Image: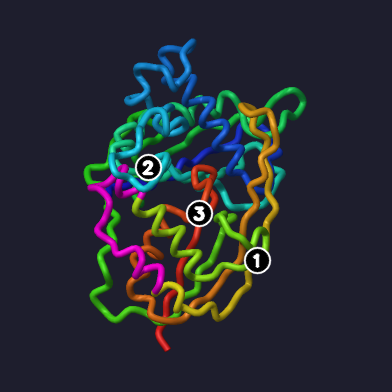
Amino acid sequence: MKFGKYLFHIKLTRDAVLPAYKGSTFRGLLGHALKRTVCALKNQTCATCILRQNCTYALVFETAHALPAPENAKISDPPHPMVLEPPLTEEKDFSIGDTLACGIILFGDLNRHLPYFIYAFDQMGRIGLGKSLNGNRAGFTLESVTFGDKAVYSKADGRVTLPDLLPTLDLTPDQDKSPDQVTLKLHTPFRVSSKTGQAPDLPFDLLMRSLIRRCTALFNTYGDGEPPLNYPDLVKSAGRVRLTDNRLSWFDWQRYSSRQETKMYMGGLLGQVAYQGDLGPFMPFLRMAQTVHAGKNTAFGLGKVSLEAMNQ
């Protein structure tokens, strides 16, 4: 499955007050700007619009309407083709001239829509971020967009250069000996359905059920189809991997949904957790999670993880 990870570098033109977690702020403004940029039939709903299967906004924010789930898929709705990686600083007060970087990861053919995201970010800067100060939100300029160590856009020349070659994700098993211990760090709230509710606990089989569902859904929708996996055996083997160190805590995050006109409670787990056992079959999923994120609400930037692997 092809993917592109882009970093949008912005410079504030006004003082700003932003929340400690900025995922909802950036995603909400991106959705507003993107719809204003690309929507051709503004009196239509996305569900009934004849352009929805080729519309950047619908593909990202109304994915279930724009992109029906593939035949024989084990998911009710296709996953979103975008992951947001907002600035992780918990700083709230910013000044004119301060810079921030917001990451966006696109899957499959959505990478061809990159120019629309760049233009939408330019419009976001004109609309403004965060709380209103003295009647104005914090404007910004989009200075550049980078793909790895290469600039695909700069304010200086205004040109967009799509990457010649995109990296790919796969579930190829390790050729070398797999580690028997891993530490998983959860940098943004990890949300998963669990009978434990808000208990700061993440058994390995619960983690792997979530990762397997997400990875296979992404391959099925944006890659070459669902990979041939023995799900019962994987889940059974995951149950034999031990949790050896638990430093997780519950982060109680909420956001306001303008569309639903209600508060949305989106808390999840933060911290780090360590596992030990036969990890070979699961390393491809764990490594892939570092790119695609894990759990629910990844379009808001939730579920960002990193991995440290070791052998005894």
Which label belongs to residue 310? Answer: none
Q: Residue furthest right?
A: 134
In the depicted structure, whether residue 202 falls above or below residue 14: below
Left or right: where does residue 115 sit relative to residue 298? Answer: left
Q: Is residue 245 visible?
A: yes
In front of the other: label 2 or label 1?
1
Magenta includes 14? no
Vertical comparison of 68 with 203: above or below: above
Q: Which amino acid, by three-letter code, is at mark 3? A: Gly
The residue under the point 23% across, 47% down is 224
Find out whether the residues at labels 3 and 1 contact each other: C-beta distance under 8 Å.
no
- Position above or below: 273 against 146: below
**What's the mark number on residue 106?**
2
* Disc 2 to disc 3, C-alpha distance: 17 Å
Residues 90 and 311: in front is: 311
- Judging from the image, what secondary structure is the residue with disc 3 in? loop
**Looking at the image, which residue is at 38% across and 80% down?**
278
Q: Report crowding for label 3: few under 14, some 14 to 19, many 20 or more residues within 10 A (C-alpha).
A: many
Specify whether residue 155 is in view: no
> Circle 1 — which element?
loop
Q: Amino acid at mark 1?
A: Pro
Residue 220 screen position, x and y as percent: 30, 47
Query: Which residue is located at x 71 percent, y 39 percent?
Result: 17
**Which residue in the protein does label 3 denote?**
295
The circle drawn on residue 200 is 1
Q: Is residue 240 above or below residue 97?
A: below
Give x and y (percent) for residue 53: 33, 26
Where disc 2 sits, the SS reads strand
Q: Earlier in the sequence, mark 2 or mark 3?
A: 2
Q: Which residues are magenta?
A: 217-236
The image quarter in which residue 67 lies: top left
